[in-house]
Amino acid sequence: MTELQQQQLLKEHLSQFVTEHKRGFMERVLASRTRYLTIVLEDIYQSQNTSAVIRTCECMGLQDVHVIETNSEWSTNKLILKGSNKWLNIIRYRKKGSNNTADCFEALRSKGYRIAVTDPAGGVPIDEVPLDRPLAIVMGNERHGSSPFALQHADLAVTIPMAGFTESMNISVSAAICLHTTLSRLRRSDYPWPLSEEEKEELRLQWYRKSVRNAEVIEREFLRSIA
């Protein structure tokens, strides 16, 4: 038996322990999930802001969030996350002595992403950013904005048009605006923003494991029974 066949049988077995209502809910979420758009959080100073953005990303249908922790370490805040981190992938870049922003950008470019760094000083309005390639939106530090490295090495700078005197908004609000604007355009487009069937299958298994009580024990016994 191949590993793929084993995983398929395991998924079917675990699905018996998930209610029909919950499985239907998961399918609706999967239908809206995307990796075509992702958010990068670069050295966010206040951990609660990172947690708030992660929660927003999950609510709006992103599957991946990239967190750069060169100078500011992210500590999870369960009250703000509300369990959102359970359902998406958080990729963290936190090697000591490394240019973690460079590492993140390299990883994103290897997957074909265009990197757009937010910059209140000016750039392409968020509702005009090209979507012909997967897009990674970089949100900078609350105090200093995006790093000089990020500004220099991104593919383009983007900005949220504003009509008031204040030059910037809270990072979680900014992220929500960027996501809503971009996702609305994507979902009206013909670009391949949905997850592939293979990605959906992988996530179903992950989510079943997280939804079933004592999933590790059930899985171990089932795999032993089909060995």
Image: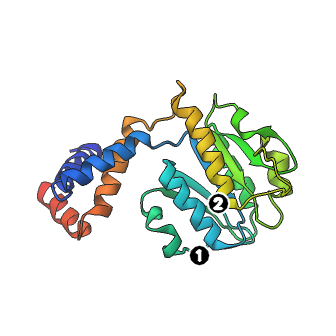
Tell me, yes or no, if residue 222 can be seen here. yes
Residue 216 position in % (x across, y down): 26, 68
Q: Residue furthest left?
A: 225
Can you tell which of label 1 and label 2 is closer to the viewer? 2
- Relative to 225, 163 lies left or right: right
Mark 1 belongs to which amino acid?
Ser
Tell me, yes or no, if residue 91 can be seen here. no
Q: Which residue is mark 1?
A: 75
Residue 53 position in % (x across, y down): 60, 60
In what quadrant of the picture does the N terminus appear? top left
Looking at marks 1 and 2 on the same chain, the residue that comes earlier in the sequence is marked by 1
Mark 2 belongs to which amino acid?
Ser
What label does residue 37 carry, if any?
none
In what quadrant of the picture does the C terminus appear? bottom left
Instruction: Give the quadrant of residue 182.
Output: top right
Q: Which residue is mark 2?
A: 172
Helix, strand or loop at label 2? It is helix
Q: CA distance from mark 1 to mark 2?
A: 16 Å
Q: Residue furthest top?
A: 190
- Relative to 158, 177 lies left or right: left
